[in-house]
Amino acid sequence: MPYDWINLPSTMPGRWLPYSQMLNEFARELANSINGFTGDVRRLRAWSEIVQTLSNPEKLEVLREFIDPLSISAMIFPYAIKARFAFAVAHLSHQANRLRSDDWLDDLKVDHEIHFGMADAHAGGWRSYKRFKRAAEDINKRQFQEATGDFRNAYNHRFPPRMIIGITGIVKRHVPDDGSPPSYRIGGLPPLDLAVVVKLLKQERDRCYVTFDQFRDLVNEQTEAIAVDGD
């Protein structure tokens, strides 16, 4: 993702200082995140070809040293990037809305409560927001979560499926909705196929690219309005 694309006047009224500083940081960190994700996917694609030539002991060695760290990072990125987009758009639009009302209130939720609902509330009046939201909603959808065994959530809160070799979730506690006593099921989650995971991650990466382009359109709409305000 590109850097140094922001087009704000060199001099502006002081009230735009929070917006300009946030925008510089958010645009840079979103690009860093997506570029980091891209690098992880590229390396995993290479490993997906290499492991086909390895014995199981060799696979275990490269899993521990290389593939596991890369796959954990890559599988978490879609959720994280989507949340960061929501955070950035909510904050920036909240500040940009100074243009829209003389009675502007600094009523944005505290940072840990910001999600896409906040972005909707504060960015909904900007023409470019709908296209941005449609693009962002494609990231980390349920299909991706299900195809990866809900890896991100399981990694943070339980035990995720293994990559290439290994079984997890051998015993699963089942609690019926009808109030019947819990039961225990024996089985297990098979490992994820790295080639399949790479294909899914490439789709998520491409969706991040599209969303970043729409984020730029939204920012450009706002900065053009701010530039007029500073004239």
Image (cartoon, rainbow, N blue to C red):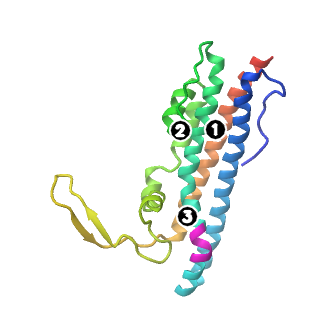
Asked if the residue under mark 1 is in contact with the one under mark 2, i.e. CB atoms within 8 Å, the reply is yes
- Mark 3 is on which residue type? Ile
Q: Give me the C-alpha separation between circle 3 and circle 1.
A: 27 Å
Residue 68 highlighted magenta (yes or no): yes
In the rendered image, the vertical position of residue 166 relative to residue 24, given as above or below: below
Quadrant of the rendered image containing residue 72: bottom right
Tell me if 160 is positioned left or right of 210 in this view. left
192, 95: nearer the viewer: 95
Q: Secondary structure at mark 2?
A: helix
State the residue position of label 2.
Answer: 134
Q: Mark 3 touching mark 1, by CB under 8 A? A: no
Return the x and y of residue 156 as percentages of the image width and height: 47, 59
Q: What residue sits right under mark 1 in the picture?
A: 214
**Amino acid at dot 1:** Gln
Q: Which mark is residue 63?
A: none
On-image quarter of the C terminus:
top right
Is 217 in front, or is 76? 76
- Whole-percent x, y for residue 194 in the image: 53, 70
Please state if 54 lies on the left or on the right of 183 as rendered.
Answer: right
Residue 94 screen position, x and y as percent: 60, 27
Chain-order first, disc 3 or disc 1: 3
Mark positioned earlier in the residue sequence (3 or 2)? 3
Q: Is residue 23 above or below residue 75?
A: above
Q: Is residue 138 above or below residue 144?
A: above
Q: Which residues are magenta?
A: 64-69
Numbered-mark total? 3
Mark 3 vs mark 2: give the one in front. Answer: 3
Dividing the picture into quadrants, the one containing residue 199 is bottom right
